[in-house]
Amino acid sequence: MHMDNLNLNGNVPSGDLADKWTTYRSTLPLVAPNNKLKIEIIVVGTGLAGASAAATLGELGYLVKCYTFHDSPRRAHSIAAQGGINAAKNYRNDGDSVFRLFYDTIKGGDYRSREANVYRLAEVSTSIIDQAVAQGVPFAREYGGLLDNRSFGGVQVSRTFYARGQTGQQLLLGAYQSLSRQIALGNVKMFTRHEMIELVLKDGKARGIIARNLLTGELEKHGAHAVVLATGGYGNVFYLSTNAMNCNVTAAMRAVAKGAFMANPCFTQIHPTCIPQMGEYQSKLTLMSESLRNDGRVWVPAKKEDAKAIRDGVKTALDIPEADRDYFLERRYPAFGNLVPRDVASRAAKTACDEGNGIVPTGLGVFLDFSAAIERYGKSKANILGLSNPAHAKVIELGEKVIEEKYGNLFEMYEKISGENPYKFPMKIYPAVHYTMGGLWVDYNLMTNVPGLFSIGESNFSDHGANRLGASALMQGLADGYFVLPYTIGTFLSEDISTPKLDVHAPEFTAAADLAKQRIDKLFAIKGKQSAESFHRRLGKIIWEYCGMSRTAEGLTSARQQVRALRDEFYADLYLPGVANDLNPELEKALRVADFIDLGEIMVVDALDRNESCGGHFREEYQTPDGEALRRDDEYAYVSAWEFKGADQDPILHKEMLHFDNVELKTRSYK
Ligand SMILES: Cc1cc2nc3c(=O)[nH]c(=O)nc-3n(C[C@H](O)[C@H](O)[C@H](O)COP(=O)(O)OP(=O)(O)OC[C@H]3O[C@@H](n4cnc5c(N)ncnc54)[C@H](O)[C@@H]3O)c2cc1C
């Protein structure tokens, strides 16, 4: 354990920030090629993090077993990522560098992440692009053939590589084909429709998992020398989110139940540009990529009566003259305007709606308007075509074509869902849960506090502090999987080269399988009346209301009681149809909801402990007179890592103190 009086050590190697990773990578213990052939590694998850890790570990010669609950590795939630992936290539010659990407990420995360990890991320970002291009990922290109870049929030350079609005899909296809190659070579054994529902420890080390075969219901024992969790984020604790419906926290919480620490669980990201919720029984929210803020201007009517008229359907956006529009991001944050980071943009939209200027019937919506960009691009295109004095209609036609080329699939998706043409009327948007910065605590090697248990991608807490910048999740997942874990896992495995193949008949495996079976039996024994889905929806409402975009000590205290009461009700009145030994999606859901409830309580406890505002964590008691977040570096410059002691006990807080030697802690300002 990396613990000292509840103080955690991130095991960051010594040396200058810029040389740290290169020096460490060149000196860390390796596993010789002949020994790799005897070492098994379990990778749970096939999103960008898991697929890239499994493919790379297979290529290195390890015996990899890879798991997903989906029917194909390609269905991982990563496929939904739209906007792009950052890298410090400086192709635009606009002043980008590894240090600037590092700095933007540390600042964007409101100084709550580990310097050394973030610098390493920025450093390897350039290799990711080379790797993806070599795989044939069709990134957008400029006329001259160079890869194109666009801007994302919280930065003043263009460093985001993209493949229209399908960047995640294209990157995942690249990682998947590398994985498929390793599967074909026999280096990776792929288990689809398998869900990890228990972690196996032997002599204090992670040595296997219990996976439920989702088609037959059988509980299978799988052993390995090390276990890597690449199981994604927990945004669905809110029930409504932009995450894929299946995303869940079970793998992480099973690890937490076995002693792994959950770090910064209250750091969740609310994305400013999503399609507003339209009904009580809606189960999914849809993201409109942040890339749209490159060209879209966010506004609400300046006059409350206009906002009401729009809500009542008496007026539309087009009836509001320019002088009566409040472009509130441009007004409040002139330096970054519509490209402020997500936490700042989300809170500003909430404020505008709380003040009564929202534009959808629920009052929770603002406009994202492309009309100025359409006209600007149209004029420029007309110029290129040599059209002098083109008619306004011609300019608009040309401008709309440019916008279509950039964001066509996003506009189409918006129109299909909302029934409104976003080329003619501004989009209606509102913040929604999108990403979780918190996750399993890991050290510099990406190993949790449980030896042999690693966590990569969104499932760990590592790089984004209290707020993630756009296009940095894909970067982190692929950095972890292709370029970091394959080296750092050697530090653990090099000590294990003489450990024989794990025997799944050992008592530790039987005990873990029994534990999983007991949990399932307990749920079936309840025989209540309410579905798992209904509990999930109620949990989501509690967490959104009290641990969402703004939080107070009073609300969080009440939320904790409400989550506890919900847990009691869940175990007293859950209705679970079907049987355990068969395909049973309701059982899958119930197991996941049980873990979401326990996570929900830890989130609330974490938010209550952190008496400051930073990034996505906005405590109303800690704000400046003009409503900005008030950080308290003297007391809270630490990572909170929670040790779970059971649902009926208080979790124990371990702190990893954060040290900043290369950046000065400043009040984040985008004004
Ligand atoms: C709509 C949307 C758009 C986004 N766009 C961008 C973007 O443009 N740029 C950007 O940088 N980021 C973006 N993000 C964030 C980014 O997509 C995610 O953070 C990232 O893809 C997560 O990758 P991952 O590999 O960590 O996890 P996932 O892709 O979520 O993969 C998790 C994997 O784990 C498996 N799994 C989970 N639990 C278990 C279990 N118990 N047993 C077996 N298997 C399990 C799943 O089957 C899956 O294969 C977006 C997010 C959303 C919601």
Image (tube, rainbow, N blue to C red):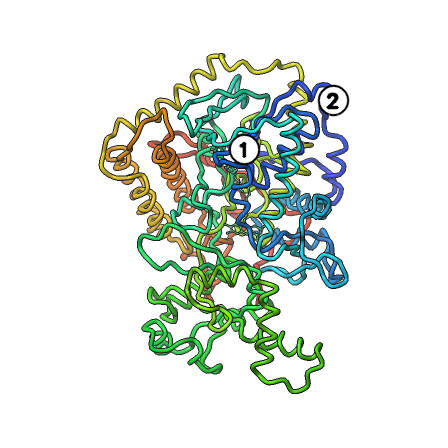
Q: The residue tagged with tag 2: helix, strand or loop?
A: loop
Tag shown at residue 668: none
- Residue 99 appearing in the image: yes
Q: Residue at x 23, y 30 (%)?
A: 527
Cα distance between the residues tagged 1 and 2: 24 Å
- At label 2, counting other C-alpha atoms closer than 10 Å, the crowd grade (few under 14, some 14-19, many 20 or more) is few
Q: Is the N terminus in the top left, top right, bottom left or bottom right quadrant?
A: top right
Depth check, front residue: 379 or 159: 379
Q: Whole-percent x and y of residue 216?
A: 41, 25
Above or below for 530 versus 396: above
Q: Residue at x 59, y 26 (%)?
A: 189
- At label 1, counting other C-alpha atoms closer than 10 Å, the crowd grade (few under 14, some 14-19, many 20 or more) is many
Q: Whole-percent x and y of residue 122?
A: 68, 48
Circle count: 2
Q: Whole-percent x and y of residue 289?
A: 53, 58
Q: Whole-percent x and y of residue 199?
A: 48, 25
Q: Is the C terminus in the top left, top right, bottom left or bottom right quadrant?
A: bottom right
Type of the residue with mark 1 = Leu
Disc 2: which residue:
32
**Residue at disc 1, CB closer than 8 Å to ligand 1:** yes
Depth check, front residue: 625 or 279: 279
> Is residue 511 left or right of 82 when viewed as pictured?
left
Depth check, front residue: 403 or 446: 403
Above or below for 404 versus 515: below
Disc 1: which residue:
229
Depth check, front residue: 428 or 121: 428
